[in-house]
Image: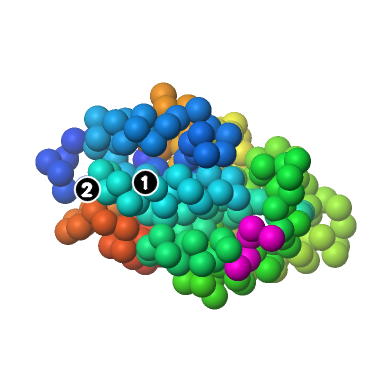
Amino acid sequence: MSEYAANGVSDDGGDSLLIDLHSHSRYSDGTATLEHIERACLERRIGISLTDHNEIRGAIKLWERDRIPTIPGIEVGTIEGLEFLVYFRDPQALEDYYLASVERFLLSRFMVRSKLRSLAAIEDAQGAGGYVSLAHPFAPGRKSIEFHRNKGPQHAAFVDRVIKSVDAIELFNGGILRTSNRKADDFSTDCDKPVTAGSDSHHISTLGSCGIRYRHLHETRGPELFDAVAGDRGRKS
């Protein structure tokens, strides 16, 4: 099972790489440019997945610039309010998924939501080769699975289908309350799912504040990083 790191990356002689699997840039609602992100990653010796809300331009450009370890990704918002982090082996797969399954459902007034239904978002992403993690499952409001469960049996059944369908659960999110993360920790153990973790950084100061540490990576290009995440190869030191 993966180990999440909540205090950045330690220096272990270059034998491991911390990957922040949830971050945002100016291409959605973050404040950081790609240059800011690259500089911070190099200084902090980390990799990231840039998961802008319903947006892929930054993630693709970050890959193409090839200056830091990165995994092409996106945070997909849905009509129900749940959000999903989707990772791909390469930017072409990300772009194909976005154009076929996300773009036509976007709402002009809401960056973080769309008309895309949660179960369709998961199915389409997995069909395109993506690895899907349920983002911040106990965040406030409509982003929370508790919110939907409390609406009644039919909604609880919907949550159960979502949990069964996703590949992983976001265990630790740097942008929400510790109590919410503790619930996610307990929940991920109970449902026996692999986990992801990320800062949910919208400002450069918090980038890399948490993530998953992966050991013995021979390459830091996206395909191997993706395989490490999808294979749940994060390990404790």
In front: label 1 or label 2 = 1
**Residue 72 in sight from this viewpoint:** yes
Label ID, residue 62: 1
Q: Residue at x 31, y 30 (%)?
A: 40
Q: Which residue is mark 2?
A: 16
In the picture, the quarter occupied by the N terminus is bottom left
Q: What's drawn in magenta, residue-wise?
A: 100-104
Query: What is the residue that sits farthest to the bottom in this orientation?
Result: 127
The amino acid type, in three-letter code, at marker 2 is: Ser
Where does residue 218 sit, x and y in percent of width and height? 17, 59
Disc 1 secondary structure class: helix
Label ID, residue 198: none
Q: Of label 1 and label 2, which has the lower sequence position?
A: 2
Where does residue 195 sit, x and y in percent of width and height? 47, 55
Q: Residue at x 36, y 29 (%)?
A: 36
Q: Residue at x 61, y 39 (%)?
A: 180
Choose between 31 and 234: the one closer to the eye.
31
Choose between 135 and 48: the one closer to the eye.
48
Q: Quadrant of residue 198?
A: top left
Where does residue 211 sit, x and y in percent of width and height? 39, 43
- Residue 111 highlighted magenta (yes or no): no
Q: Is residue 90 left or right of residue 196?
A: left
